[in-house]
Amino acid sequence: MTAEVAGVVLAAGEGRRLRPLTEQLPKALCPVGNVALLDRQLARLAGLGLAGADTVAVNAAYLGNQIVAHVGDRAHVSVEADGPIGTSGGVAGLKDWIGGRGVLVGNADGYLADPAREAGKDIAAMLDGWSGETVRMLTKPLLPGTTGGFSGRRFTGFSLIPWRFVRDLAAVQSDLVRTVWRPAEAEGALELINYAGVYIDTGTPADYLRANLHAADGRNLIDPTAAVDGPVQESVIGAGARIRGALARSVVWPGGEVAADESLTDVVRAGGGLTVSV
């Protein structure tokens, strides 16, 4: 890599497909394997040497106060006060902060797991040998039976954008597909970087549960502060949760409870007894 690069994690979305879970938490803070999705992406950027408020930014809108409090001083935070303005608008709102650098943009809701499970190192190819002029996109082959994408490949969570594209973006409702990726493709300046690991868009309850079960890797992931008195199989249990009933292939958020007379399978149990079956 020869060009200077900043990191941005997009965390402003409402997560409508993940409701009612996202009525309690913004999608970026929903835990996967007991780690907030946003923290997974921040760790991935840190693995590439991108960390701190001068080098990494997060945008926020929906339930933005939760994002601001969660990030603290770990990154610069840009709040979209009038609501989310899309992936392109979100990057545009950070132009003054980006200040001429290229930007490695990650979607907070993407779950990535490389074969060695080493955060950051699995996407190092996004930066290796970059000229600072092309757009790079992390990709995997299109799923069977699907169409679209880019030369038979699909986006998997990260894009590297040179300043020459960023400087022309407007802070209005817009997406990177139309403002950056397709224009770069048209001029022959889109590089597709293969991602060998697992990628799951956690936008639906089914995929959110699937990401958690992948993180558990066939085992239980139980926070040390959780109290578990019932049988648990292949589940993820958050901090302060209380499990007295039976649980299988499920997720219990921090503070969640499973009563002694309950037997839950393939569900997400959040606070206040909210249960989403998959």
Image (cartoon, rainbow, N blue to C red):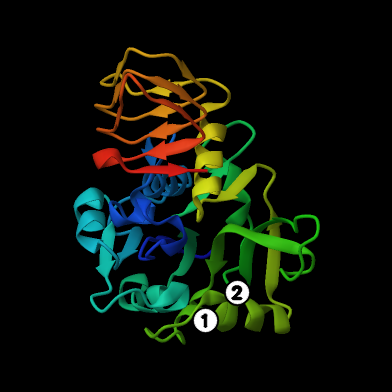
Which callout, 1 or 2, points at the residue further toward the start of the chain? 2
Look at the image and tell me in which quarter the N terminus lies.
Answer: bottom right
The label number, if any, that marks residue 254 in the structure image: none
Which sits in the foreground, 186 or 220?
220
Q: Are marks 1 and 2 in contact (CB under 8 Å)?
A: yes
Kindly identify which residue carries mark 2: 133
Picture quadrant of residue 65? bottom left
Residue at image location 41% in from the left, 79% down from the top: 89
Residue at image location 23% in from the left, 75% down from the top: 81
- State whether residue 81 is above or below residue 70: below
Q: What amino acid type is highlighted by mark number 1?
A: Arg
Asked whether residue 244 is in view, the answer is yes
Residue at image location 57% in from the left, 34% down from the top: 214
Residue at image location 47% in from the left, 60% down from the top: 17
Q: Position of residue 100 (x, y in %)?
A: 41, 75
Picture quadrant of residue 224? top left
Q: Position of residue 42 (x, y in %)?
A: 39, 48
Kindly identify which residue carries mark 1: 164
